[in-house]
Image: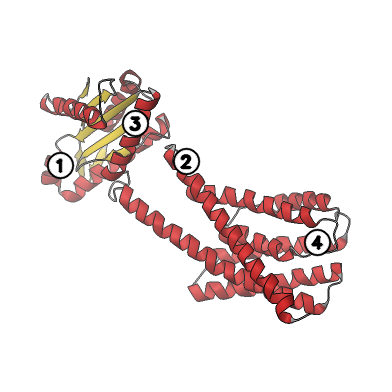
Amino acid sequence: MTWSKWFVAPALTSIFFLLGVLTLYWFMTNKIIQYLERQHKHVNVPKVRTIIGLIYMTLLLLITQTSVNGTPDRWVFTNFEIFAIAFVSYFLMLQIRLWQLLAATVIFMLINGSLFDWLPWAFAIVYIGFYFTLKQVRHHQHHTWRDLSDYAITTLGFSTILWGITTIRFHLPLATAGWEILFSFLLLIIMYFYVDSLFDSASTLARLTYTTNFDDLTQVRNYFAFKNDFNDSFHDAQAQHESLTLMLFDIDHFKHVNDTYGHLTGDYVLHNVAALITQQLAAIDPDLRLYRTGGEEFTIIFNHFTTEQARTHVDAIAQAVKDNHFHHSGQDIEISLSVGVTQLKVSDENQLDLYRRADQNLYFSKRNGRDRVTIA
């Protein structure tokens, strides 16, 4: 049997299999994240990717091992087992405890009938050690090429030991074991660059998305995000005959704060007012969001709230800002809000009708003494 027939064809097949596994994982996670975001859910992207990755890899391991269980070739997926543990430990950085790994090992051995064989246990112990060692390697990253070197040395060392145990257990020729170790190393290096590029791309996209949708000073969503979310909320409320309330508010006499105390104090006020209200919204409903839609103007979309249902929260927000102690550069600063609130009406033809009414209520509050809430 020639080298090209014995090694190259399976190698190419396995590489494409590996890339397919990773690409499918990435596709599924992105689709799920996009779906959750469309549902206006608060999405912890790293947590979602981790949970999906753990479930995905566990199912793949069970399926692949079950497919060859009881056959003399059940060693053929050893490289996939090595690839899976590297993926969940180094790239997903899963926090799995030792007892959880041991429990999973026992269950896995019960499935494939190897619970009372010492060689599978030796493999499992090294496999678990591989997991914790790779986590330490990832935790102590230094420099790009140093990171690659540490990863490569660790994966090569453990792959060699794991394949050594597999060779003894299944009486494999040493030449076969040698090629498999080389191939395992090749797969793990390809995975390093491929997955690293995926995560770098995701990180770049996340930064761009954040810059596009969030205000840098206050760390709340900006006018661009408001337009998109308000458009979705308006059409959803109309289509489903749901309640929708809009709250617009200005920080009273903000120009006076800037002119009297300076722009740094003004930035402090904007940031801390936003932080205070964001904290309150999280306690009311985690799906509520604060938007900075102008210099000192903010907006809150109350999905599924009538004005009566939202009124208590609106009053509490305004009162909390008024009662809060704002202190900057040795100065005590009193802050209040002018607020305009309205809800969706049957006669509203588009979101501009709703927004314009809330804006008119806001300016009514400002023209009539400020520090007040106008609901109409």
Q: Is residue 290 visible?
A: yes
Q: In screen coordinates, is 22 left or right of 298? A: right
Q: Earlier in the sequence, mark 2 or mark 1?
A: 2
Q: Position of residue 63 (x, y in %)?
A: 72, 52
Front position in the image: 79 or 258? 79
Q: Amino acid at mark 3?
A: His
Q: Amino acid at mark 1?
A: Val
Instruction: State how far apart marks 4 and 2 are (Cα).
Output: 39 Å
Which label belongs to residue 74?
Answer: 4
Identify the secondary structure beneath mark 2: helix
Please rate how many residues cluster around mark 3, counting C-alpha atoms within 10 Å: few if below 14, some from 14 to 19, many from 20: some
Q: Are marks 2 and 1 in contact (CB under 8 Å)?
A: no
Q: Position of residue 129 (x, y in %)?
A: 71, 63
Instruction: State how far apart marks 4 and 1 are (Cα).
Output: 74 Å
Identify the secondary structure beneath mark 4: loop
Identify the secondary structure beneath mark 1: helix
Residue at 34%, 29% in the rendered image = 302
Which label belongs to residue 257?
Answer: 1
